[in-house]
Image: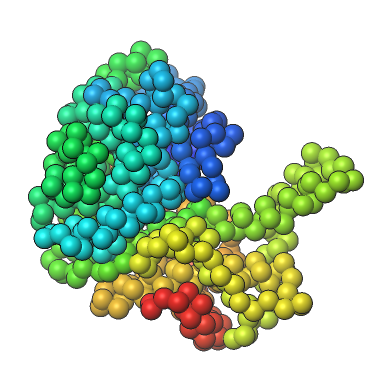
Amino acid sequence: MQEKLVIGMDFGTDSVRGLLVNAMTGDVRSTAVSYFKRWKQGLYCEPQKDQYRQHPLDYMESIDEVFHALLTGLSPETIKQIKAIGTNTTGSTPVAVDEQGQPLSLREGFSENPNAMFILWKDHTAIKDADEINALAKKWTIDYTRFSGGIYSSEWFWSKILHVNRVDPALANQAFTWVEQSDWIPTYLSGTTKVSAIKRNRCAAGHKAMWNESHGGLPSSEFLCSLDPSFYHLVHRFYTETYTSEQEFGTIAKVFVDRYGFDENTLITVGAIDAHHGAVGAGSEAYTLIKVIGTSTCDMLVVPKQDNPPLVEGICGQVDGSIDPGMIGFEAGQSAFGDIYNWFKKMMLKPVFEVQGLDLSDRQREVLENNFFAYITREAEAIPLTAEDMLFTDYHNGRRTPDADFTKVAAASGFTLATGAGHIFKALVEGTAFGSKAIIDRFRSYNIPIKAVIATGGIPNKAPYVVQVLADVLACDVQVVDSDQTCALGAVICAAVSAGVYPNIDDAKLKLAAKVSKTYHCNPERAAIYEKLYQAYKKLTQLEL
C-alpha cells in the first residue's frame, strides 16, 4: 500500500523546522532544521530601538535547506507520494509587497532597507502608532478592538504598517499592499503571483488585523484613512475573505517540482500562526489551556461556539476558527519567557568571556555556555522557598497579556547583600510563572474555566525545574507532551486534512497529535507560599489582575 506523506514546516524566530510524516500512521520519516543566516548575524536589527527585521532570503534559503534534508535518500517514487505541505510562522510579521506579491526587499533599491523586510513579531517600534489606533477605535462608531481584547498592540499588523508609512514614505509609496509572513510562505511555495489570489489565514487576520465577520471583515476604509492619509492607496488592496488552515491554498510551484521531484499536484495549505498550530499539534481540546513556551509564550484556549463565551478584555483576541475550525480560538501570552533566561545567561557570561587577561579556549567557552543553566538551576532549587523571597516581574520585553503595554519594563524587589545568582534566576523563573497565572486569572474572571494545562515547546522538554515551578504557582497539574515540535506537527495535521487523509481536524489529531508524556503535579505547600508571593507580584506590576 502506498504511503500518504505530508510535510509540516514551522517558521520560528531564528529557524525553520520541518517534519516529513506518514499521515496514515503518524510515523516521522525525517526531520530538518535550518537557521536564518542573516538573522543570526543580527542584520537589520537594532535591539536598543526594539527593531527586529528579517530578510525574505532567509526564509527562501531555509526552505531549500529543509526540503533537501527531508528528502535526501528518498526515491523519486516516494517523493511523489507527498500529498500536502502545511506551514506556520511567527506573527504578526508583515511585509510590504508589490503587485505580484513579492516583498519589496527582493527588489533593487530596497534590498538593504530594514523597512522593506519582514517586521518580526517582537519588533516594538510602533508603540506610539498603536496608541493612536487605540485612541481612534474608542471614539469610532464600531470598536474594532473588541475582539482583540480591547487593546490593539504595537506587535500587530496595522501598527507596523502605520509606523513604516510614516518613517519611510518612499517605501510606503512603492508598497502595493502588505502581507503577513504566514500568508507569504504559502504564496511563495505555490508560486502565486497575484495579490488578489492570496488566501489570508484566519489566525493572523482575526488576532492581529482586527478582522471579524460581525463588522464586515477588516476595519473600514474610513477608519484607516482617518487614522492616516497614507492608507488611501492601500485600503482597496487588502482582503475580505479569510480561510482556516486545513483548507487548500494552491498547489506547489513548478520550481520546486523541477528542483526536488514533488508531484505537481502536491497541495499547499493555508497558513497559520505558529503557536496556533502548536495548540493543534498538542491535541487542543475545549477548555484546555495550551502554553507554547519558547522565547515568548502563546497561550491558546478553544471554546465551543455554542457556549457563547464572553468578550475577554486584555487578551490577544478571540476568533471563530482561528485554532480549531468550529471553535472560538482565544490567544494570550507573554512577550518574553525563555528570552528572559537567555538575557540572564548572557549578562552573566559576557564579562567572563571578555575580561582582559582571561584567555579562554573555544572549548572552555563551550563548556560555560552548555552548562550554565544546569548549574544555575541547581543553585535555584537549593534555595528554600519563603513568602519574603525576591521578586521579578516578567516585562523585560513589555507586557503582552493581560492588557498589552509595551512601554512596561521589568521590575525587581527584595535584593540584599546576600542575593546571589541563584536567587535572581529563581525569581526570574517564578516571575514568568506569575505572568502565566495572571493570564489564567483573566480568563477565570470572565467565568471561563481552565480544566487542564498543557505545556509544549522547547522549554517544557528540557527544563523540569521551570515546569515544576509553573505547576506550583498555577496550583494545578501541568502536562507535557512527547514532542517539542508541536507547531510543525500542527502543520502536519492540517496538511493531512487538506489532502483528504482525514475528514476533519479532530480525527487527524487522534492519530497524529502529540501525547502527554509527563505530568508535573502541584505541591500544595509550595502553592500556598506562591500564592502569597503572587499577591506581592501583582503589587509590583501595578496592575489589577
The residue that appears at 18% across and 49% down in the rendered structure is 226
Q: Is 110 rendered above or below residue 158?
A: above
Residue 352 vs residue 24, the one in the foreground: 352
* Residue 36: image location, x then y, percent: 51, 33
Q: Which residue is at the far right?
A: 357
> In this figure, which colouring scheme has been used for the structure?
rainbow
Relative to 75, 327 lies left or right: left
- Location of residue 173 (image quadrant): top left
- Location of residue 234 (image quadrant): top left
The residue that appears at 34% across and 29% down in the rendered structure is 170
How many marks on residues?
A: 0
The residue that appears at 22% across and 52% down in the rendered structure is 210
- In this orientation, does residue 89 appear? no
Q: Which residue is at the far top?
A: 258
- Location of residue 23 (image quadrant): top left
Relative to 24, 392 lies left or right: right
- In this orientation, does residue 305 appear? yes
Q: Quadrant of the C terminus?
A: bottom left
Q: Quadrant of the N terminus?
A: top left
* Residue 240: image location, x then y, percent: 13, 41
* Residue 215: image location, x then y, percent: 11, 54
